Image: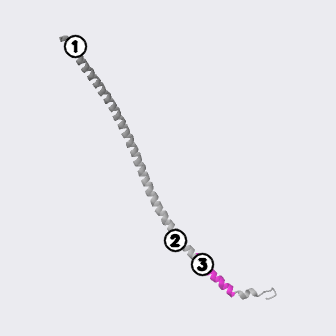
Amino acid sequence: KAEGQLMELRKGETNSKHNFEMLRQSLEDQKGQDSKNLEEQKAGKAAAEEGKATAEGDLQMATKTLESSTAELASTQGACMTTAADHEATVAGRTEELKVIAEAKKILMETSEGAVSQTYSFAQV
């Protein structure tokens, strides 16, 4: 009877030892998988931080370009307005000149109407 109990105890101990080894192996496998996942997460984080740094650099360049373009636009608009004002002044001046020329032409036509009807010959001296 004692040997039967001893055998049952040994069998129980063997089962407990086997269960412990299985649990240990499972925990070691889980630890290895978790370590692998952690390394993947770290690599992903590093790549995301690199992408973020690149994007921030691009944003700074785009912001500087936008500021430069905005300043150039303001300068160009100012130059355009100045040119438009100069053009308007030139057009007004030309319009006034054309009025004066038309008036002078009218006066010349009125004062020289009689001369057109006169004929001159080489014999008149």
What residue does disc 3 label? 97
Alpha carbons under labels 3 and 1: distance apart:
130 Å
Residue 97 within the segment the image draws in magenta: yes
In the drawing, does residue 86 fall left or right of residue 32? right
- Whichever of labels 2 and 3 marks the residue nearer the N terminus, that label is 2
Percent from the top left, x then y, of residue 62?
A: 44, 52
> Residue 99 lies in what quarter of the image?
bottom right
Q: Which mark is residue 85?
A: 2
User: Crowding near pointer 3: few (<14 within 10 Å), some, many (20+)?
Assistant: few
Whether pointer 2 and pointer 1 mark residues with C-beta atoms closer than 8 Å, the reply is no
Q: Residue at x 56, y 73 (%)?
A: 90
Amino acid under label 2? Ala
Depth check, mark 2 against mark 1: the one in front is 1
Q: Looking at the image, which is closer to me, 51 or 5?
A: 5
What residue does disc 1 label? 7
In the drawing, does residue 16 fall left or right of residue 66? left
In the drawing, does residue 89 fall left or right of residue 122? left
Q: Secondary structure at mark 3?
A: helix
